[in-house]
């Protein structure tokens, strides 16, 4: 007589599915953010900013296509360090 443990597999599959959905939703947000910020940077002729934000947009597309999160890719701003801040109003 053989016994199978489907409860563990089902729970693992559900968790994996939720992570994939979360990665896809995050990817859509990254695409929107990258596209919007690229437009702003292009309007101010900031070629470096455009390139960075196009990379953010592409990473978002990858997240949507693969369902794998791209967190920690170093593409976003790091407010604690001041990195990513380009506009200063003095």
Image (cartoon, grey):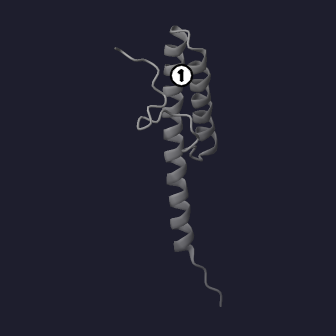
Which residue, given by chain and number where applicable, does mark 1 sit on?
35
Q: Secondary structure at mark 1?
A: helix
Give the residue drawn at x 54%, y 54%: 17
Give the residue drawn at x 56%, y 25%: 53
Please, which residue is most extreme toward the front here?
Answer: 90
Please, which residue is most extreme toward the left here?
Answer: 90
In this rendering, is residue 8 above or below 87?
A: below
Splitting the image into 4 quarters, where does residue 75 fall? top right
| Residue 47 screen position, x and y as percent | 60, 15
Mark 1 Cα-neighbour bin, 10 Å: few <14, some 14–19, many ≥20: some
Query: Is residue 36 found left or right of 80 in the rendered image?
Result: right
| Residue 37 screen position, x and y as percent | 50, 21
Q: Nearer the viewer, residue 49 or 35?
A: 49
Give the residue drawn at x 58%, y 28%: 57
Q: Where, quadrant-wise, is the N terminus in this rendering?
A: bottom right
Q: Nearer the viewer, residue 9 or 88?
A: 88
Give the residue drawn at x 58%, y 43%: 70
């Amino acid at each position: 007589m053989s016994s199978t443990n489907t409860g563990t597999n089902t729970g693992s599959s559900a968790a994996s599915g939720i992570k994939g959905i979360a990665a896809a939703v995050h990817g859509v947000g990254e695409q929107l953010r990258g596209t919007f910020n690229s437009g702003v940077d292009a309007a101010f002729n900031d070629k470096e900013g455009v390139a960075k934000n196009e990379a953010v947009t592409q990473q978002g597309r990858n997240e949507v296509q693969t369902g794998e999160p791209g967190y920690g890719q170093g593409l976003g701003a790091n407010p604690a360090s001041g990195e990513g801040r380009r506009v200063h109003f003095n």
